[in-house]
Amino acid sequence: MIPLRDTQPSYTTPVVTIGIIVVNFVVFFFELSLDPFSRNELISVFGIVPRHFQYFDLLTSMFLHGGWMHVIGNMWFLWIYGDNVEDVLGHGKYLLFYLICGVAAGVVHVIFNAGSRVPTIGASGAIAGVMGAYLAKFPRSRILMLVPLIIFFTTFEIPAVFVLIYWFLLQIFSGVGEVGYSTASQGGVAWFAHVGGFLTGYLLIHAFKTRDRFRRRYDLNW
């Protein structure tokens, strides 16, 4: 199943979400312009390498991606959920929120993979935080899903709470399933970074004061 859009309207232009998407694609196109050696060196220097951890990597790794599907998938999820969270927080607080979630996700990844020499890159930890915030603020929203059925496709809406909780549990079970099987020489998905980002976003959104007009709209709609 592929999420297409949500049913929750956004009342402001998500300029920060759009800006983050643009920056990620600009950086990705820069990666593509490099030769393979230089690209690997860029990822090694600015990705998170737990065994050689450097604090600035927590930020720079968020804007690097390993391929077209990686960057498109991440930016698509950010587009679906980010506009509403930005609407809730306002532009400045939303940017701070996004970066904090990404940093927290990176820290969790380092904790669970302390000896790894494999660089980890991608915005998925920060986006997981946005998804956690979306669950906290819009549990009654619905997500339109594209579903392949053998030889054709169909769409139907699923409550956001089911989609997001299912996604979160999938990250946990996938991460636990890989414990004991991964080595410092292997790559893969940073499952626990997703878990850490999601939990950070779900909890942190309650510490950020939401816009007054959002609270009024929320009371009227629900």
Image (spheres, rainbow, N blue to C red):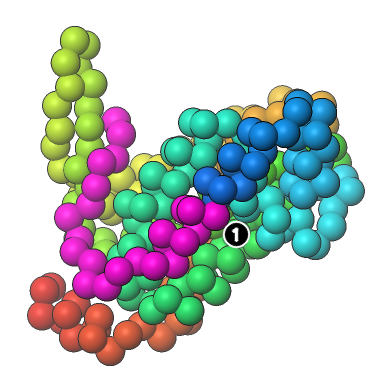
Q: Quadrant of the N terminus?
A: top left
Q: Position of residue 108 (x, y in %)?
A: 68, 54
Label 1: element kind: helix
Image: magenta residue range: 1-23
Instruction: List x then y, in percent, for residue 157.
Output: 15, 43
Number of residue marks: 1
Q: Is residue 145 magenta?
A: no
**Residue 8: quadrant of the picture:** bottom left
x, y (%) of residue 144? 19, 43
Residue at left offset 52%, top offset 31%: 68
Residue 118 shows in the view: no
In the image, residue 158 sits, relative to residue 35, either above or below, namely below
Mark 1: few, some, or many residues within 10 Å (few <14, many ≥20)? Answer: many
Residue at 51% from the left image edge and 71% from the top image edge? 95
Horizontal side of residue 46 vs 175, given as left or right: right
Outermost residue, front direction? 33
The image shows residue 127, relative to residue 89, as above or below, that is above
Q: Quadrant of residue 15?
A: bottom left
Which residue is pictured at 67% across the width and 34% down the height? 33
Q: Is residue 141 left or right of residue 101?
A: left
Q: Is residue 205 above or below residue 68?
A: below
Which residue sits at x=84%, y=53%? 53
Residue at label 1?
102
Percent coordinates x, y for residue 158 in the rendering: 19, 44
Q: Residue furthest top?
A: 151
What amino acid type should be assigned to the residue bearing mark 1? Gly
- Residue 130 falls left or right of residue 154: right
- Image quadrant assignment for residue 85: bottom left
